[in-house]
Image (tube, grey):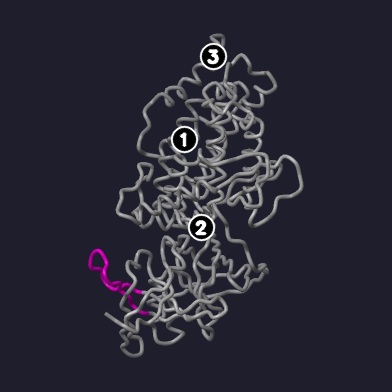
């Protein structure tokens, strides 16, 4: 800093003092300080020059503050409260500003305007992508999508650094690759379909495992699985080759999730066995929750499902009941009109034979998460259609959009209890779903996550008359953070 400008030195002193102070446990207080100092540093060209001179402590402080918000957002449901949504929006903007400052320094360095600063462009590139990756993580934790031109920025920093041509043993080059791989792997895992706790756990898991994945310029062979293509000239995330073939253009990148899928399989085996999990199994979720999460993201990394039916735009209102417990209670009500008291009004925005996208119309919904059960119908005369939330978006606290997968066109409330469980448990509310002959599915049960614990279980129905039977599980077809769906048959030889 020049001694000839004492006023500039005086303005920088509070910023430097704050950056040197210990991090406090109040994320809102820390965020307010970060936003205030970033605004001051960006208010003039001379101040922006000082901002670029304290990039390293700003990077470290911004990342630390964002980690504080991860925990708060992980425990929240969507839509966020107005206060938490405002904080998340400010955190996203702050991360974007610090990343932009790194990008400006990189541009100056490439044009030989900042050689005297003696900065390592590879280190700056790695930090820029890490900041963008953290911004992407916070965006999905808050139910938002990536900011406009987010992917163009990330691709541009990676391409300009060209780490694939660099020294693979260089820590800075490896840092660029790791940050970019993290971003691609998290995007490929379909984070819009995960809960906040799942995203937070997966982010820590990827930070420890993503370096083993592959990224290259050459396209994969026909026998190679789990590959995604990236067009650096487009503002788009990685796209699975299984879902859409790459366009015939030059400059594409190819990313493989096969190694992540393989590691997920190994960890699932450990979690479901008697041996302790590996040291990189991060805390925050129970063993069965981690195994359920890894099964779902493994599918996206190895062979993502592709849409079999085109969606058509539509617009009509529907009654919606959210959550398995609420649906179970609603279906026990005698009469269609009394069931409507458990529902709220939503609007269908598009639909296909296997799913819907719906948007809330009435007052803000509460306690929504990816993976929960949803029942909907157009009016009192129609039966309830049972769905599972595949993704959720909430750009504002007043607006929520859900992507739904249809699993049945009717349901019957029952209670189930599994035998030979490790510890006695109460009977759980569940829904019996009718067979779907076209899909080859027998009768099935939708139950709370963690209900399944053995091959045999007791089933009790008491809606019209008391019915008790022993069921035998045939296959576990779906697991989310909230529910699990399994096919069953009535056991002809009850124990």
Q: Earlier in the sequence, mark 1 or mark 2?
A: 1
Calculate the distance from the C-alpha at mark 3 to the C-alpha at mark 2.
48 Å
In the image, what residue occupies the spot 49% across and 80% down?
Answer: 435
If the image is split into quadrants, where does the C terminus sit?
A: bottom left
Tag 2's secondary structure? helix
Tag 3's secondary structure? loop
If the image is split into quadrants, where does the N terminus sit?
A: top right
Q: Earlier in the sequence, mark 1 or mark 3?
A: 3
Contact (CB < 8 A) between labels 1 and 3? Answer: no
Residue 26 locus on image (x, y percent): 37, 39
Reading the image, the residue beneath label 1 is 63
Q: Which mark is residue 193?
A: 2
Q: Classify 250 as above or below 113.
A: below
Out of 422 and 6, give the one closest to the viewer: 422
Residue ranking furthest to the front? 223
Q: Classify 417 as above or below 9.
A: below
Q: Classify 268 as above or below 424.
A: above
Reading the image, the residue beneath label 3 is 1
């Amino acid at each position: 800093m020049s001694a000839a400008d004492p006023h500039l030195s005086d303005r920088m002193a509070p910023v430097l003092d704050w950056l040197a102070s210990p991090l406090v446990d109040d994320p809102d207080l820390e965020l307010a300080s970060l936003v205030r100092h970033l605004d001051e540093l960006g208010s003039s060209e001379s101040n922006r020059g000082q901002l670029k001179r304290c990039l390293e402590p700003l990077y470290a402080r911004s990342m630390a503050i964002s980690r504080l918000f991860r925990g708060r957002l992980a425990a929240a449901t969507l839509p966020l409260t107005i206060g938490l949504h405002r904080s998340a929006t400010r955190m996203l903007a702050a991360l974007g500003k610090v990343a932009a400052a790194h990008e400006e320094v990189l541009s100056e360095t490439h044009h030989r305007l900042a050689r005297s600063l003696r900065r390592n462009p590879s280190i700056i590139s790695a930090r820029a992508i890490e900041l963008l990756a953290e911004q992407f993580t916070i965006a999905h934790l808050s139910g938002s999508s990536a900011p406009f031109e987010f992917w163009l920025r990330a691709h541009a920093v990676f391409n300009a650094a060209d780490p694939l041509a660099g020294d693979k043993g260089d820590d800075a080059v490896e840092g660029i690759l790791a940050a970019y791989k993290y971003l691609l792997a998290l995007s490929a895992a379909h984070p819009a379909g995960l809960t906040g706790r799942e995203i937070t756990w997966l982010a820590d898991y990827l930070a420890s495992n993503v370096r083993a994945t592959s990224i290259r310029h050459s396209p994969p062979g026909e026998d190679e699985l789990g590959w995604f293509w990236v067009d650096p000239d487009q503002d788009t995330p990685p796209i699975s080759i299984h879902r859409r073939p790459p366009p015939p253009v030059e400059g594409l990148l190819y990313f493989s999730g096969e190694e992540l899928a393989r590691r997920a399989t190994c960890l699932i085996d450990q979690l479901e066995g008697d041996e302790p999990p590996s040291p990189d199994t991060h805390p925050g979720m129970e063993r069965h929750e981690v195994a359920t999460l890894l099964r779902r993201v493994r599918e996206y990394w190895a062979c993502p499902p592709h849409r079999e039916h085109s969606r058509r735009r539509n617009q009509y209102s529907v009654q919606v009941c959210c959550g398995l417990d609420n649906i179970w209670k609603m279906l026990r009500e005698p009469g269609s009109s009394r069931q409507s008291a458990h529902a709220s009004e939503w609007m269908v925005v598009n639909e296909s034979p296997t799913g819907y996208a719906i948007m809330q119309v009435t007052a803000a919904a509460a306690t929504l998460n990816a993976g929960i059960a949803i029942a909907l119908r157009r009016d009192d005369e129609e039966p309830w259609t049972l769905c599972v939330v595949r993704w959720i978006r909430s750009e504002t606290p007043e607006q929520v959009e859900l992507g739904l997968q249809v699993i049945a066109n009717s349901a019957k409330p029952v209670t189930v209890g599994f035998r030979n469980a490790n510890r006695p448990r109460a009977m759980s509310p569940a829904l019996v779903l009718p067979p779907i002959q076209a899909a080859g599915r027998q009768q099935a049960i939708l139950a709370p996550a963690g209900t399944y614990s053995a091959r045999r279980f007791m089933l009790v129905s008491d809606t019209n008359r008391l019915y008790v039977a022993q069921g035998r599980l045939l296959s576990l077809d779906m697991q989310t953070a909230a529910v699990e769906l399994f096919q069953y048959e009535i056991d002809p030889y009850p124990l």
